[in-house]
Image (spheres, rainbow, N blue to C red):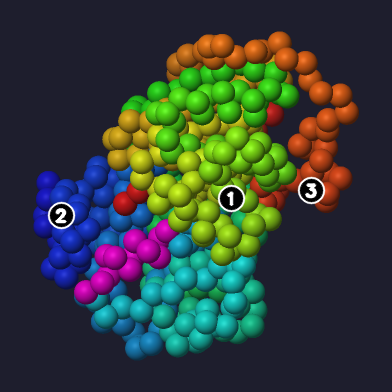
Amino acid sequence: MPFQALGLHPLILQAIQETGYTEPTPIQGAAIPEILKGNDLIGIAQTGTGKTAAFTLPLLHRLHSVAPARQNATRTLILAPTRELVVQIEENVQAYAKHLPISITKVFGGVSERPQIQALRSGAQMVIATPGRLLDLMSQRCADFSALEHLVLDEADRMLDMGFLPAIRRVVNALPKKRQTLMFSATLSKEIESLTHEFQRSPKVVQIGRRSNPAETVTQLVYEVPRHLKASLLCHLLTDPTMNMVLVFTRTKHGADRVARKLESLSIKTATLHSNRSQNQRLRALDDFRSGAVRVLIATDIAARGIDVDGISHVVNLDFPPQVEDYVHRIGRTGRAKAIGDAISFICQDDHSNLRALERFIGRGLVRKLAKDFNYAEPEPLNQPRDEERGRRNGGGGGGGGRRFSTNSSSRFGGRSR
């Protein structure tokens, strides 16, 4: 089915053609008609299947084709959990709206709020924001959402599960009751889905593939290794030239910095992405990784939802993720849009129960491997603190995600893009 069959405005179709897209993905083909009808919607599909275009294309059509209640008013609000994801969505929307007279702005922390305040006060028609900075500006009476028609929660499961629920409630309570509300994510548990009824009215559900199912094009491998040898094993594996664009996930920002220093000492170009980095540093790290200036990008989970980079050859879980949803989103950074990719997880003795829980969840076992010519017997250095201990000494070493909110204790391990 071509995009022309979806009923989008010709100027949007022209922009789509100029971006090189030829036909809609399944999530786009299913979601766009429902959104054009004005229905509330829950969209569930794997990472890299085009969810961003699935909601932004029809919303741009409605903004351009439906006369506003008043001029110079914000009509669409998109909320996302991370700065990187806000930037990614805004870049995509700007490309799709290049031929439309629609004003678009992004709102997030870590940068000056002055231009964001000016854009909000001028009534940007589409606002893409993180909840924290948006609430700050709303408390300063810089935003007027009285004419809002559309609300989108992107990465809805993580928005509700990362401790954002109170902030989202405050934002939603300030919006008109009569509006279209869309929720999109790669994963959405039934328990968290029940919370969507708080924000939506009889939503349609569009689900492509099995919930929380990793992409079939990703080869998933497990290496069992002592904790103190993780960084050494990563260096050993990186002698393989096919690992040419590698995204590494660590549990803590201190662990990310430590591994980055080790790789750099071996002349492996590396960048880090975590909450201790300034916004400019985070954007530069992504740009350098995307351009090939660095071979390895090391990130914490908070950044997983905003990394939209084509061509990632390998994702490495240096630290096994605490939740199955985190695993799905991490490895979804490779094998995007039906491309081939590898996902490698390092497993320590403490991770075995978590690994078994993941295998039960996805319905299959993961292949175990041993690295050839690697010395697994190297002793652990004396008096070397773990990353978690180092983080506690320095006032907390997490990835910046805050507390978790979950109504589904069984989903915890502890016991896009177009």
Q: Is residue 77 left or right of residue 34?
A: right
- Tally of marks: 3
Give neighbour class at mark 3: few <14, some 14-19, many 20+ (Cα, 10 Å): some
Residue at 48%, 14% in the rendered image: 367
Q: Is residue 121 left or right of residue 350?
A: left
Residue at 29%, 35% in the rendered image: 338
Image height of 386 relative to 155, above or below = above
Q: Which mark is residue 396?
A: 3
Image height of 228 relative to 188, above or below = above
Q: Nearer the viewer, residue 181 or 129?
A: 129
Q: Is residue 281 left or right of residue 389?
A: left
Image height of 353 relative to 8, above or below = above
Q: Which residue is mark 2?
A: 3
* Label 3: which secondary element: loop
| Residue 47 point in image, percent of width and height | 40, 42
Tell me which corner region of the image, top left, top right, bottom left or bottom right, holds residue 310. Answer: top left
Residue 89 lies within the magenta run = yes
Asked whether disc 3 touches disc 1, contact meaning CB atoms under 8 Å apart, the reply is no
